[in-house]
Amino acid sequence: MKQTILFAALLLALSATAIAQQKEAPACTVRILLQQQNWDNPEQTRERMTPDQTKWWLEDGQKKFKNFCFVSASQPYDYRIVWADSETHQAGFIPTTTTTEGTVTSGNKTGSYSETSTTNNGREVTYVTTYVQIRLLKADAQVGCAPLFNELHKGKWIWSKPDRAALENALKALSKLTKSSR
């Protein structure tokens, strides 16, 4: 009798745990294939998130877009997000600024002076600008069809993270689209 009650209690606890886990993990209702496209050769694609995109998705994105999930090309998907990036490099100079100060004595009079000058022959640097284009397409979209969402981000990669911002904006557009289609 004790074993039956213990077994029933264990079974009840396991089913309660399973129900709680189901409530924590919402069902994936929008399946997305994310692909990086070669900027110079659009026919070349690979399934890839950048480190910034991955970090944002794991820390914030999954909370904001609970019904979205990313799948591989071998699985069925509802939408495709395709992104590409390109960089431009531009040489420039960090100007050199010099300040000269001193005093001058002439006879019994003393005066002070201060002068600041800037020259463009300072340290040479390379400025890198990154462009990220992102497009949202239906899974069955034909090559060359108009995307549901298209955006071009420009920024300094290290600071502005245009790759992360582009993905978030595409998911916001998809969220609006899927809510309006219900």
Image (cartoon, grey):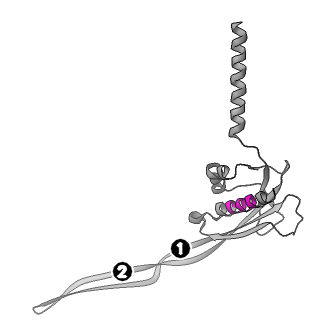
Classify residue 21 as left or right of residue 116.
Answer: right
Count the labels in the image.
2
Classify residue 20 as left or right of residue 105.
Answer: right
State yes or no: residue 169 in magenta. yes
**Mark nearer the N terminus (1 vs 2):** 2
The 10 Å Cα crowd at callout 2, few under 14, some 14 to 19, many 20 or more, is few
Residue drawn at x 30%, y 82% is 100
Residue behind mark 2: 98
Residue extending furthest toward the top: 1
Residue extending furthest toward the bottom: 107
The reply to whether dot 1 and dot 2 touch (C-beta < 8 Å) is: no
Asked if 74 appears above or below 20 in the picture, the reply is: below
Q: Position of residue 58 (x, y in %)?
A: 64, 49
**Quarter holding the N terminus?**
top right
SS at circle 2: strand
Q: Position of residue 88 (x, y in %)?
A: 65, 73
Classify residue 139 as left or right of residue 97.
Answer: right
Task: Report the disc number at residue 125.
Answer: 1
Residue closest to the eye, 15 or 140: 15
Report the span colored magenta: 167-176
The 10 Å Cα crowd at callout 1, few under 14, some 14 to 19, many 20 or more, is few
The quadrant where residue 95 appears: bottom left
**Quarter holding the C terminus?**
bottom right
> Label 2 is placed on what type of residue?
Thr
Q: CA distance from mark 1 to mark 2?
A: 19 Å
Q: Position of residue 144 (x, y in %)?
A: 87, 69
